[in-house]
Image (cartoon, rainbow, N blue to C red):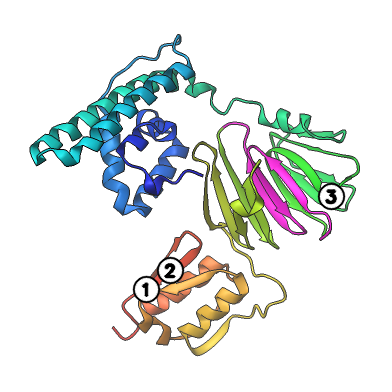
Amino acid sequence: MKDYQNFEIEDFLLDENFVQWVKSPNAENKIFWEQWIASNPAKASTAMEAKDIIKSIKVKPFKEISSSKVESHVQDIMEEIHQIKGQENEVTNNTVYSFSRWIKIAAVLAVAIGISWVFYHQNDLGKTPIYEELTASSNLPLIEQVNNNEKPIYVNLSDGSKITLYKNSRLSYPSVFKGNNREVYLMGDAFFNIAKNPNKPFLVHAGTIVTKVLGTSFYVKAPSVGNNIDVEVITGKVSVFEKDTKPNSGVVLSPNHKVTFYDGQHHFVTGLIDNPQPQGEQDNVFEFRDTPLSEVLAKLSNVYGIRIDVDNEKLYDCPLTADFTTQSLHAKLEIICATINGSYETKGTVILIGGRGCGD
């Protein structure tokens, strides 16, 4: 995963994903970069300056330049940039300004070379038949299920696991699992209800990520078009990581949580599923009479496995009288907010309730 927090202007200018967002924005890179800039205010001005520089250049894509030639030209220019930077401490402020300006111009030249190659090839990005490559790498003969119908189809695996395969999706799996892992391959959308076997983890290969579980239920959405892959956990815990990396390099999801993997940016963004469900054998009766909000939120957090915070600690003392046992989590939150004259929002994996306090 790239450490964009340490990027300077020249790094953004030469980052393929950043350039694509500026020159050819789509739903995926637009969401990623807008969220990243909002979450990293200290780097926002640097990123926006790089964006302005890229937008100021106009180049046409040309086919004859090779990627190695691009890299060679860029490297030569960047070496000169670093040499100029090294001289900045030996000159006056006015001269430093001119050198800084020259650095930006040189960086633009580097980008101009790179963009021509990036734009020519950008439509090829993501077209590698990853699913076919993955299935071809299996050491076991595979059975493939293809669903081109409107209705889902149901697949029973030899270990007792059950999979729901949705429209325009493909799933490959062995007739019998052998070795240390249970591995299947997915392109499209599927719901997995995995039989528990602590001695043999279950691995779902989808695009460039792997979802690893011991026994749980979850969704994987890996469309054949586009680079975003979603994993949503219903029960149990799963580990999601990029293939060819260690499992601890990714993210661990608990029930009612999800992650979106942005393949182009090699970046995971976590959040909550749309309709969280109560977990386990918890006491799911939500009937309160003059109960402090702190106790109500503690029970909600425990039952749903979701962190719930307030932006004003005065809210914790607000009394609540209500019975919302049968309502969804979001309906429960709406009732709470209506009672305390507040509001709530989801920030990543946290629900934040705001308000001035019930006595104000």
Three-letter residue code for mark 2: Leu
The residue tagged with tag 2: helix, strand or loop? strand
Residue type highlighted by circle 1: Asp
- Within 10 Å of disc 1 (Cα), the crowding (few <14, some 14-19, many 20+) is few
The x, y position of residue 65, in whole percent, is: 44, 12
Residue 180 numbered tag? 3
Q: Alpha-carbon distance for marks 3 and 2? A: 42 Å
Residue 271 visible at all = yes
Residue 17, image x, y percentages: 44, 34
Q: Secondary structure at mark 3?
A: loop
In the image: residue 84, left or right of residue 348: left
Task: Based on the picture, tell me whether residue 61 belongs to the magenta stretch.
Answer: no
Q: Residue at x 78, y 48 (%)?
A: 163
Q: Nearer the viewer, mark 1 or mark 3?
A: 3
Q: Place residue 243 in its image quadrant.
A: top right
Residue name at image x 30 percent, y 29 percent: 54
Q: Nearer the viewer, residue 157 or 47?
A: 47
Q: Which is nearer the N-term, disc 1 or disc 3?
A: 3
Q: Earlier in the sequence, mark 3 or mark 2?
A: 3
- Residue 302, position in %: x, y? 60, 76
**Figure check: 61 above or below 222:** above
Specify start and end residues of the magenta stretch as a single range: 197-225
Task: Report which quarter residue 313 is drawn in.
Answer: bottom left
Residue named by callout 2? 352
- 181 over 81 or under it: above or below: below
**What distance separates the C-alpha of mark 1 from that of mark 3?**
47 Å
- Residue 76 left/right relative to 211: left
The vertical placement of 61 against 100, above or below, is above
- Mark 3 or mark 2: which is in front? 3
Residue matched to label 1: 311
Q: Are marks 1 and 2 in contact (CB under 8 Å)?
A: yes
The answer to whether one can see residue 321 in this image is no
